[in-house]
Amino acid sequence: MRIDIITIFPDYFAPLELSLIGKARAAGILDIRLHDLRSWTRDRHNTVDDTPYGGGPGMVMKPQPWGEALDAVAGGAGAPPRLVLPTPSGTPFTQERAKRLSDEPWLVFACGRYEGIDARVVADAERRMPVEELSIGDYVLAGGESATLVIVETVSRLLPGVLGNAESAVQDSFAAGAMEHLLEGPVYTKPAHWRDQEVPPVLLSGDHGAVDRWRRHEALRKTARNRPELLRELAARRLHELERSD
Ligand SMILES: Nc1ccc2ncsc2c1
């Protein structure tokens, strides 16, 4: 997979040289390219923003640098990339959406700042490529860079060869499988006794069936406490499956 990231803060993406993603880049599994949006500005101050039409607070990112950046990065011959625009007003980014993005051969991320990017940039891009506006949650960030890091990490770890055998076997909280859609319960490692706390005896019992039951019970408890709506969705899904099988 090729990933292009257009941003005014290329250094923000230094973490993509580390760990699993850094190794995947070195192995040629991932081709991540960073582009400084200011390279496409025309004034001596490298201006990328201006005041919003219609008034209001903050600044809006100008269309001209973005239009020319997307022309240069995504405008070549051949199949266009999918443009991913992280924005608080986007559709929710989920593991399911990450799986779909991981099937794409080429993604381009447009990292907006300030109050956002002039809307004509997306309208212009949609004439040449699919565009996906994604939100990673309902809170205030300074821009799209941290969201892009989250999306790139989530998508990249799904690519063949990125995770080692050990990691890929891990049942992440939201991965498909026996605990699908449940949160992970507590985990333990050596020593069995630490600061007057014991590891739950069932985990030392060697009874794999009992361990599985205990883990599912703890996952249900954690989900009921922290994300009760996931349990309601799980119950509704199971009821739907039962009704279909009747
Ligand atoms: N403030 C904010 C919240 C969510 C989000 N997702 C992608 S960019 C962004 C920015």
Image (cartoon, rainbow, N blue to C red):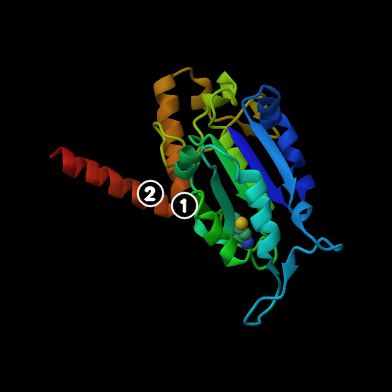
Residue visible at 68% across and 28% down in the picture = 25
Q: Residue furthest front?
A: 77
Q: Residue 231: give its label.
A: 2
Q: Would you say 9 lies left or right of 63 here?
A: right
Contact, mark 2 vs mark 1 (Cβ under 8 Å): yes
- Position of the N terminus, as image quadrant, is top right
Residue under label 1, please give it. Answer: 227
Q: Position of residue 42 (x, y in %)?
A: 79, 60
Q: Secondary structure at mark 2?
A: helix
Q: Which element type, helix, strand or loop, lies under badge 1?
A: loop
Q: Position of residue 208 (x, y in %)?
A: 43, 20
Can residue 150 be seen here? The reply is no
Up-down relation of residue 202 to residue 221 (above or below)? above
Query: Looking at the rendering, in which quadrant would you find the C terminus?
Result: top left
Mark 2: amino acid: Leu
**Residue at 77% of width from left, 40% of height from top?**
14
Q: Nearer the viewer, residue 129 or 151?
A: 129
Pick whichever, 20 or 65, lies toward us.
65
- The answer to whether residue 185 is left or right of residue 241 is right
Q: State whether residue 45 is above or below residue 72.
A: below
Q: Is residue 105 above or below residue 9?
A: above
Q: Position of residue 170 (x, y in %)?
A: 53, 28
* Displayed-image quarter of ligand 1: bottom right
Position of residue 40 measured from the top left corner of the image (x, y, whole percent): 75, 54
